[in-house]
Image (cartoon, rainbow, N blue to C red):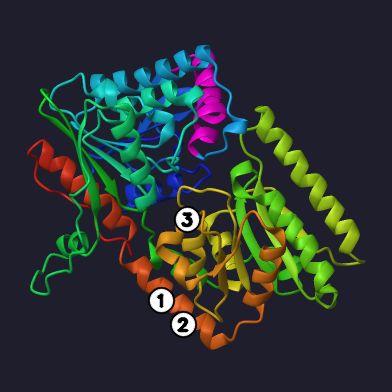
Amino acid sequence: MNILSYRGPGMAGGVSPALTLLMQTSSQRENCWWFINAQAIRLTSDGASTGQFVSEIPSEVIEGHYRYANEFIWPVMHGLCEYAHYCPEDRALYERFNHSFATQILRLARSPINFVQDYQLALVPQALRRRAHQSTAIFWHIPWPNSVPERFSAQVIDLAQALMSANIIGFHTQAYAENFFEFVRKYLPAMRCDRSVLSGEKKPAETDSNPSVRAQEKTSWSYYRCDQPGSGSRTTIVVQPLGLDVDYWSTLSNCHKNTFFHSSMIKTPYVLSVDRADYTKGIINRLRSIDTFFDNKPELKRHLTFAQICTRTRSGLEAYDQYWLDCQRQIDFINKKHGSEGWEPILNVENPMNSPQLALLYRNASVMLVNPLKDGLNLTAKEFVACQTGPPGVLALSPAAGVWSELGRHSVAVDPTNPDQIADAVHAALTMSRSDKSQRIHQMLKQLRRNTLSDWCNQFVARLQAKVGQPLHSHRAIS
């Protein structure tokens, strides 16, 4: 199988670490991961961070693709069109980038099975479709909006048509899949769409001795079908949120060999947030809620810290650079207003953390605050839950995060648009009884184990291999 993604091994974000773990635990050595690094397409079969050089991509193509993906697709898909900027020249470079990727797959790849990741490579399925006997899935890791302004509808139709060239399109939530399905029905009327095909959860057969088969059976799949009359082609739209290797994170959180700064720099209980300085993450509202929190609870000054791992993202693009500066100004204001000698209310860490460091931060946090305005999934919420191996913390979660559909009912809800409500919700989480905390974490862990990282991948692999008549291989269970 060919796994295609924009970011490769060792890169920030939830998708890269997940794919790295999959490659490291795969029992199929013929799997290849194709990605971009140092202005070149590279591939690796073992998760190596540099990978083997395949082909260079001109810098102007890299830069135009970067702008189109992040200044147009990203804000439109998150329903924040006030940030969207459409440039026809960048659209052309975005297409060149995607076609360069597909060309190398068709030229060099030995496997006809392709698993494409995310919005940066949205046109790849269309390019691969030109070659017979290719079987392709694409997973859309970001939201699909419930409406698109008419001024941008032509460009989004362009994306949807390309996606419909895939055999399977995956989404994290039912809502995002439904939004896409309705968009196709409205703007691609030639498609014959069937929403009545929905699968329930299959329980594993107790008599089945094959663990990988049982893992595939226990995962719930919801899907729709869209046929292209006259062509004989069918696209299946699937709801299958990215899973987590719970045991991996649990083991990291229990590794006492790991040491990290919080033991010396955070002298108080703390509320943790981990995200990029992206306007979709609701960071400004979170900072305002911290200001409100200490206004309302001055007795907790010097007794609680808000620890924020907030890395800069998409440098060189005006909207993201400005958001970063706005965040820094807000942090400085709050620390000066509420801080005192030897203590600041916000500990802001700008550098990314590796998994062992994050695991310790997750394990010891009193509250994990996840408050995006809109999010495809948000793996940090799942990672936090998996790391609750000591005295339990509480997940405070925005319903606008994709992971809400899995964990929301056992979290404390926060309204990402209401700083006053966020402050109240954090206080409620801090004062929750230990038995209530334990019960919530227990229920969330049960949910995470119903859909592991290997389950997620195996579902797509099995269906893609069936399309081309190959034996159904699977990844080893991750432990």
What type is the residue that disc 2 sits on? Gln
Q: For mark 3, what is the residue?
A: 379
Answer with mark 2 or mark 3, whichever residue precedes in sequence: 3
Q: CA distance from mark 1 to mark 3?
A: 17 Å
Q: Is residue 305 visible?
A: yes
User: CB atoms at circles 1 and 2 under 8 Å apart?
Assistant: yes
Distance of mark 2 from mark 3, alpha carbons? 21 Å
Q: How many marks?
A: 3
Q: Position of residue 46 (x, y in %)?
A: 34, 43
In the image, which residues are magenta?
56-77
Q: Label 1 belongs to which residue?
A: 443
Task: Let me know if residue 64 is in the magenta part.
Answer: yes
Q: Is residue 446 left or right of residue 271?
A: left
Mark carried by residue 439: 2
Relative vertical location of residue 435 with respect to residue 87 in this rendering, above or below: below
For the N terminus, give its image quadrant: top left
Residue 424 percent coordinates (x, y): 69, 70
